[in-house]
Amino acid sequence: MMFDSVMAGFGGQGILSAGMMLAHMAASQDYHVTWFPSYGAEQRGGTANCNVVISDMEIGSPIVTRPGHGIIMNMPSFQKFEPRFAEGAKAVLDTALVGKEAITRQDVKFYGIGASDIARELGNIKVANMVMIGALLSVSELFTLETACSALKHALPEKHHHLIPLNEEALRKGFAQNSLLN
């Protein structure tokens, strides 16, 4: 099994945290995993992305040039990464920030979810990344929702454990509410 992904958006959207969350899930299931972050000096408001590779065998490189999966949370990231996806890839777009009309490739399955809108409805925009992780898990069938929820206590610092129920709800909403865009 080999799962390689890119997660991209603005700094402050929790892109790197989403990647770390996915890495914690993989580690909890005894997979080999790499998490490779990249962000500009701007941090909040600048671009941020990370590569996550999960495998049942040793991983040769943390760098993903033709990702098979992805989470894209803003238009600049979509424009940067859409051409890089491998043929047959599956990617989840935050349709609150990336319009369906931007899709130019038919050889990649793009799924949409209004993650930012859902997070606002839940009362905290910061859980949009968890909505996106839930959607990615749903379309990729990588891990179950139960695996994701149980990884939260290890992925979140103890001082944020009071936010676990909110994050679980965000994961559930993402897992249940996504649709193929093309």
Image: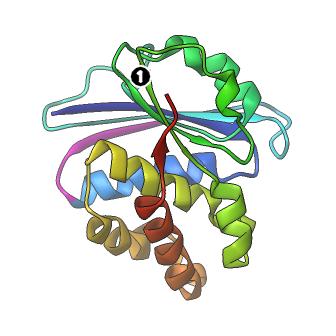
Question: Could one spot residue 37 in this view of the protein?
Answer: no
Question: Relative to 22, does residue 162 appear above or below in the rendering?
Answer: below
Residue at 26% from the left image edge and 48% from the top image edge = 141
Would residue 176 be counted in the magenta stretch? Answer: no
Secondary structure beneath label 1: loop
x, y (%) of residue 116?
Answer: 70, 57
Q: How is the image coloured?
A: rainbow
Q: Name the residue nearer the viewer: 94 or 67.
A: 94
Q: Which residues are magenta?
A: 29-35
Q: Position of residue 32 (x, y in %)?
A: 23, 41
Residue drawn 42% across the image and 32% down it: 5
Residue 118 visible in the displayed image: yes
Horizontal relation, residue 74 to residue 88: left or right:
right
Q: Residue at x 65, y 32 (%)?
A: 100
Dot 1 alpha-carbon crowd within 10 angstroms: few under 14, some 14 to 19, many 20 or more: many
Q: Quick one: 147 or 117, which is closer to the camera? A: 117
